[in-house]
Amino acid sequence: MIVNKPSPLLDALEIKPSIGIVCLAGAGGKKTTLYRLATLYPGRVGITSTSAHITPFPDQISAYQVITHEKQLPMLIKTAANTRRLIAYAQPSARKGYLAGVPPTLVARIHQQAKFDISLVKADESYNHWIKAPIVEETIIPEEATIIIPILSVLAIGQPLTEKIAYQVRQIESIIKIKEGETLRPLHLARLLASAQNSLKKSHTAKIIPLINMIDNPIWEKQGIITAEIALSLTDCFDRVVLTCMSQINPSVITVRRS
């Protein structure tokens, strides 16, 4: 394997000009990664979610927000895109403290009409867990997606597999081949990443680039690299795994590639 560091986040995830629709799935840093990509990318950006619920967009990303029902979204966003670089949009939600996502077909339509260079989409629910099983029914990806980024947190390594850190424990058990309460190792997280290519790829032609988040010190960095190398040995459906620490102003990024 080839380990490249440091690497710019946009380059590591192949976020190029006019890349199209980029979807983030899994658990352990979807929103953090989404918002960091939005602020780093210099072109016209749309931010949204296809999952049932999303927390309100943070003020620090300085996005123009369009929060309304789906029938009104296309025209309002198209108009705003004439003068705004960064637009975050969603629907109102009856659930207090949350916004509602939009249908995947509408994301594709708005992306085209607003002439976004990139649309960043939170396409999964995980409810603040570190790992999640890639379940097709809960991962709502537009057919037009060009990149899918399944995410997990390296902090799950060394922890017991429980509902505290893992969303959908029963599904995860069948994928990583350990029982609830047993300790998670790099091999188990690697199996989870490798399984994502089957569940998330579906009929999409999107490129999958897994991301291991929270490599906040040399110990977690080493564990992340081991996990990435094992994942690459288990499947040939992706050619790299990106490791990140988003707690820094300039994200620390390592790319592990198949040699």
Image (tube, helix red, strand yellow):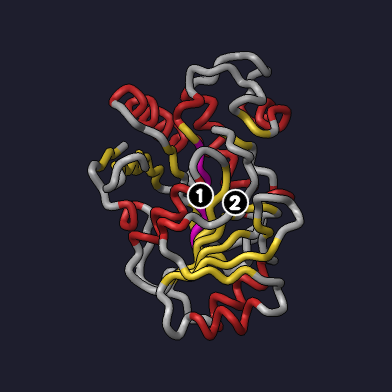
What residue is at 28 percent from the left and 39 percent from the top? 2
Residue 171: x percent and y percent? 71, 32
Question: Does residue 159 lie above or below 114 as drawn?
Answer: above
Kind of residue indicated by mark 1: Lys
Kind of residue indicated by mark 2: Thr
Question: Does residue 159 lie above or below 26 as drawn?
Answer: above
Residue 179: x percent and y percent? 67, 17
Instruction: Describe the element under mark 2 as helix, strand or loop.
Output: loop
Main secondary structure found in the magenta portion: strand
Q: Residues within 10 Å of mark 1 (few under 14, many from 20)?
A: some
Q: Residues within 10 Å of mark 2 (few under 14, many from 20)?
A: few
User: Does 100 lie within the magenta span?
Assistant: no
Instruction: Describe the element under mark 1 as helix, strand or loop.
Output: helix
What residue is at 39 percent from the left and 46 percent from the top? 240
Q: Depth check: give the residue in front, 129 or 3.
A: 129
**Nearer the viewer's eye, disc 2 or disc 1?**
2
Magenta-drawn segment: 146-152
The residue labelled by disc 2 is 55
Q: Is residue 137 left or right of residue 28?
A: right
Residue 63 found in image quarter? bottom left
Q: Quadrant of the C terminus?
A: top left
Residue 170: x percent and y percent? 73, 28
The residue labelled by disc 1 is 31
Q: Quadrant of the N terminus?
A: top left
